[in-house]
Image: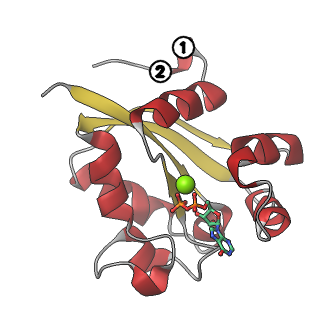
Amino acid sequence: MANNRTFTMIKPDAIAQGNEGAIIQKITNSGFKILALKMTRLSREKAQAFYAVHEDKGFFEGLVDFMTSGPIIAAILEKKNAVEDFRALIGSTNPEEALEGTIRNLFASNIQENAVHGSDSDENAAIEAAFHFNDDEIVTY
Ligand code: IDP
Ligand code: MG
């Protein structure tokens, strides 16, 4: 099976706690290749657009506040079965339900401040990657 891509963000809580290095190490140790990587800060508009699928949810405004509260690290990752394997590596949205050793089990504070984003489908991975990166910021190797 060919390699494919997923998109991730290391969220502001993880960076505020100094966990970004440990998270990147766990990602690369798990066989993901980094094809693009950037430290950035989301505007309110970008955070709202990224999470537009959740705009009717009660947690939406809080989520936008949180995601704009500090810098994030955005990355495109490549691996065989990337989307599914990365969701397994990060664990459940709610860290209380995340399996032992997953990134959210290790580094998330609560269901909102849960350390990392991971795309939920190949289609969304492509949309999210293009949302954050231009073609000339993505390497192949
Ligand atoms: P996911 O990140 O595991 O795919 P989604 O349901 O897509 O989870 O939710 C997107 C993000 O919104 C979560 O990662 C989390 O930061 C936040 N979120 C999800 N559900 C809740 C909630 O019930 N309360 C507060 N924040 C939530
Ligand atoms: Mg999601």
Question: Whole-percent x and y of residue 44?
Answer: 87, 48
Mark 2 residue element: loop
Q: Which residue appears at 54% of the width and 12% of the height?
A: 136
Question: Which residue occupies the foreground of this view, 75 or 84?
Answer: 84
Ligand 1's image quarter is bottom right
Q: Image check: 36 left or right of 103?
A: right
**For mark 1, what is the residue?**
135
Residue reaching furthest left?
1
- Percent position of residue 112, x then y: 65, 73
The disc labelled 2 sits on which kind of residue?
A: Ile
Residue at 27% across / 19% down in the picture? 141
Q: Horizontal placement of 30 versus 37: left or right?
A: left
Q: Residue under label 2, please give it.
A: 138
Q: Residues within 10 Å of mark 2 (few under 14, many from 20)?
A: some
Q: CA distance from mark 1 to mark 2?
A: 6 Å
Q: What is the secondary structure assignment of the residue under circle 1?
A: helix
Determine the residue positioned at 56% across, 71% down.
114
At label 1, the amino acid type is: Asp
